[in-house]
Image: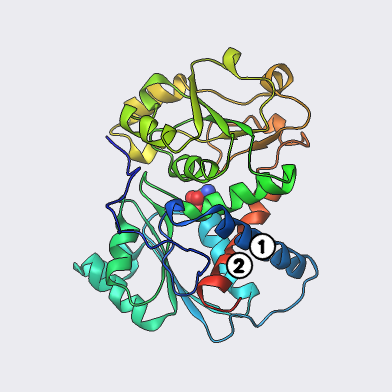
Amino acid sequence: MNQVITHPPGSLELISGDFKGKDILSLDQFSAADLYRVFALAREMKELVLASQPSQLLAGQLVALLFYEPSSRTFGSFAAAVKRLGGQTLDIQNPEVVSSVWKGESFEDTISVFGAYTQAIVLRHPLPGAAQRAAEVANVPVINAGDGNNEHPTQTLLDLFTIYEQFGRLDHLKGLLAGDPLNSRTLHSLIRGLALFEGNTVYLLSPEALRLTRDDLLALRSRGIEIVEIHSEREIPTDCHFWYWTRIQKERLSSLDEYQQLAAASFQVTPALLAERANREMILMDPLPRVGTIDPAVDSDERAVYLRSQIRNGLYTRMALLALILGKA
Ligand code: CP
């Protein structure tokens, strides 16, 4: 299956320095300058949170968190982000069960309804393109919180912010992206983001069946990012700046058998692998949940940021993004 690497011309509104009222559907809407704007504000949000400083920036704002798929981090950090800034959330998890979707209400009608009550909709959905469809019918901004195996743009904001905070730049970096390039929406958005900066190289390590499609590989390479597919841990360059490990996306596969075969062929970070192929300055990232990706014995390594800064940066970047979209910053 081809991923949604390109969009129909004109179907995505570029940020172009102005976030107010915009939908956030894809990394393709961002320029490098737009990302730096989010990061600058995320740093302010970080200071605010670390100082336990109350904020009323989003006072009077109500944001719908409409999640058709389970989530810990994205749901939790968006909810925390709104509340930290003095706003409120309308939480709808599993709308198939707890809303009139259960009675057969269409997706479009559900979006229109929650758009009528709120100032923005944060949407997670199992179907690629669902966020774009929601944006077509909603009268408020829609933020894509992950649409099937397509994209997860706000995850990339926090991932790039984490890398930027560590290295002070987003260009001329080498990254190892392991796990499930075919189905991982976090990887699809991250590669797009890294392609906005000069001189970046990523190495993709996965079982053969989970490689990017050839069309997508070529489309992404045409953006100027160097993408090298590797086949074993022995090929991991020892000078990578970051490793980014993703789980096999069980929910995108057709059977448990298929998942078990792929899981058996997948790669895992262990203390031994770190000792053999990683340098002292790199960071180890994982969008989580951690399912077969990283041995917990690695957690105490100072390079492991997945349960530390990477998690916390999800809060700061989402606070920044909400403030910008709602016209409060
Ligand atoms: N990284 C991420 O999207 O995690 P959740 O599925 O828990 O939101």
Disc 2 residue lies near ligand 1 with CB under 8 A = no
Residue at the image position 34 percent from the left and 31 percent from the top: 256
Return the mark for residue 319: 2
Residue at the image position 43 percent from the left and 32 percent from the top: 221
Disc 1 residue lies near ligand 1 with CB under 8 A = no
Q: Quadrant of the C terminus?
A: bottom right
Q: With respect to residue 256, does 135 lie above or below?
A: below
Return the mark for residue 42: 1
Residue 44 screen position, x and y as percent: 72, 67
Q: Secondary structure at mark 1?
A: helix
- State the residue in front, 64 or 139: 139
Q: Quadrant of the N terminus?
A: top left
Return the mark for residue 322: none
* Residue ranking furthest to the right: 51
Can I make out residue 106 in this image?
A: yes
Looking at numbered disc 1 in the image, what kind of residue is underneath it? Ala
Residue 210 falls in image quadrant: top left
Q: With respect to residue 2, does 17 lie above or below?
A: below
